Image (cartoon, rainbow, N blue to C red):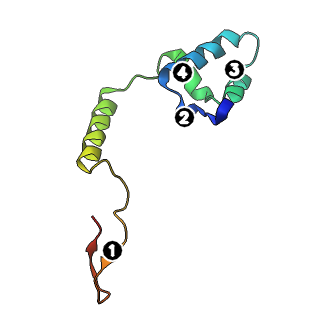
């Protein structure tokens, strides 16, 4: 992509424009080739064509909200808290905060 921008950095409106562009050229070029050149997943393109993209199910929306809540409760951090903290005598006394 120009400027090193990949599909992961596109907003949903940008992707919709790409999908519409692919659709407009699909009679002249293969969808496979267009998707490859534009670095767009063919599966995502066809899901969009079926109207399945960008529609979260109620369960997925609920899970998304739960993940955001827990992430916020943990000071917006994720992953391992780090190696154990050692006291002066070399014994493990706990983990870093």
Q: Residues within 10 Å of mark 1 (few under 14, many from 20)?
A: few
Would residue 81 be found to the left or right of residue 5 on screen? left
Disc 1 and disc 2 in contact, CB within 8 angstroms? no
Which residue is pictured at 72% across the width and 27% down the height?
37
Numbered badge on residue 84: 1
Query: Sequence-wise, which precedes: disc 4 or disc 2?
Result: 2
Residue at figure coordinates x 48%, y 16% from the top left:
51
Please identify the quadrant where the C terminus is shown. Answer: bottom left
Give the quarter of the image for residue 63.
Answer: top left
* Res 8 label: 2
Asked which quadrant contains residue 82, the reply is bottom left
**CA gap, disc 1 and disc 3:** 52 Å
Q: Distance of mark 2 from mark 3, alpha carbons? A: 20 Å
Callout in the foreground (2, 3): 2
Inter-mark Cα distance, 4 to 3 = 18 Å
Q: In the picture shown, does residue 33 fall above or below 66?
A: above
Q: Calculate the distance from the C-alpha at mark 1 to the C-alpha at mark 2.
A: 35 Å
Q: Disc 1 on helix, strand or loop?
A: strand
Identify residue for label 4.
14
């Amino acid at each position: 992509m120009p400027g090193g921008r990949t599909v992961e950095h596109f907003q949903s409106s940008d992707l919709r424009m790409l999908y519409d562009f692919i659709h407009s050229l699909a009679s002249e070029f293969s969808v496979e080739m267009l998707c490859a050149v534009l670095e767009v997943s063919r599966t995502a393109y066809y899901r969009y064509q079926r109207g399945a993209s960008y529609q979260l199910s109620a369960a997925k929306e609920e899970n998304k909200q739960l993940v955001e809540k827990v992430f916020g409760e943990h000071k917006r951090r994720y992953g391992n808290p780090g190696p154990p903290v050692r006291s002066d005598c070399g014994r493990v006394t706990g983990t870093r905060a």
